[in-house]
Amino acid sequence: MRTGMLLTIISVPLIILWSWMMIAVGQEEATPAQEGGVVTYVQGNVKKKPAESEEWQRAQENTEVFSGEKVRTFEESRAEMELQELDVIRLAPNTTIDIIKLYEETKEKRDETQINVEEGDLWALVGQVSADESFKINTPVTGSAITGTTLRIDVAEDSSTQLKVYTGEVKITNAPSATGLIPKPLPRISPTQGQAPGSMQGPSSVQGPTSVQGPQSVTLEEWVYIVKRMQQIRVDSRGQVLSSGSFSKKDLDEQSAWVKWNLERDKLRRR
């Protein structure tokens, strides 16, 4: 009699425990893990703003970052983030980025990453991207497709942009579909204007947007450049190419503390 009662008493907690475990497993399967990154270095004042929040939070080392969040650095501040331990981005002082997507799977089964640089100077070390992956770094006036690349993007207060490629190559365009922005009403320009002959591949002409009604054409012709190793391109706030061509490690800009610090960090990662 006592044995039967003991078995009954023991079995009830086991059933409850088993039920809790099944509920937990079901919830885990129903909510996929959110892909993100982690802040691996902080100097000075660095903050992040979670998605659907107006409050900026202090971002310290080992702070996680996810899709939909913004990260910013202030005066005399720097930050480094590792994304899935695969790719690295670094923010110079007074830089703001918007992490639109981090390795999100699309309906076409592609892993997409998109980071918008709103203002400031960003350094990126991106590994080789496969055919079913997409890694983009956009500015207010350009969109850049990244693969197997070390690059630097500098966005001024007026949104003018400079891109420098240290290794690999980058496809950069002013096409609205790539930047995710609505084109400004501007006079038509030549996509080759300001380009040094033979300095880099491109641009390849693409179909421009339709002219709107009015006394003159107000559309901007789209362009695409392939920027290769040790090449740079400068684009003004209207999306017009100002200059393009090679740069040298001996250039004054390449002697800055920001560039030297990034090159040293890259060397440490390769050891």
Image (cartoon, grey):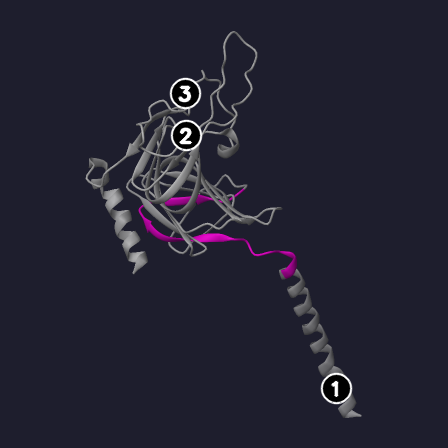
SS at mark 2?
loop
State which quarter of the image contains the N terminus.
bottom right
- Left or right of 180 in this view: 267: left
State which quarter of the image contains the C terminus.
bottom left
Spatial CA distance of label 2 from label 3 is: 10 Å
Which residue is rendered at x = 28% and y = 55% of the image?
A: 267
Spatial CA distance of label 1 from label 2 is: 79 Å
Q: Where 140 sits versus 85, above or below? A: above
In terms of depth relative to the viewer, which is nearer, 184 or 133?
A: 133
Q: Which residues are magenta?
A: 29-51
Q: Earlier in the sequence, mark 3 or mark 1?
A: 1
- Label 3, residues with CA under 10 Å away: few <14, some 14-19, many ≥20: few
Q: Where 143 sits versus 113, above or below? A: above
Which residue is rendered at x = 28% and y = 57% of the image?
A: 268
SS at mark 3?
loop
- Left or right of 140 in this view: 242: left
- Left or right of 29 in this view: 214: left
Spatial CA distance of label 3 from label 1 is: 85 Å
Residue carrying label 2: 203
SS at mark 1?
helix
In the image, what residue type sits under mark 3?
Ser
- Label 2, residues with CA under 10 Å away: few <14, some 14-19, many ≥20: some
Q: Earlier in the sequence, mark 2 or mark 3?
A: 3
In contact (CB < 8 Å): disc 1 and disc 2: no
Residue carrying label 1: 7
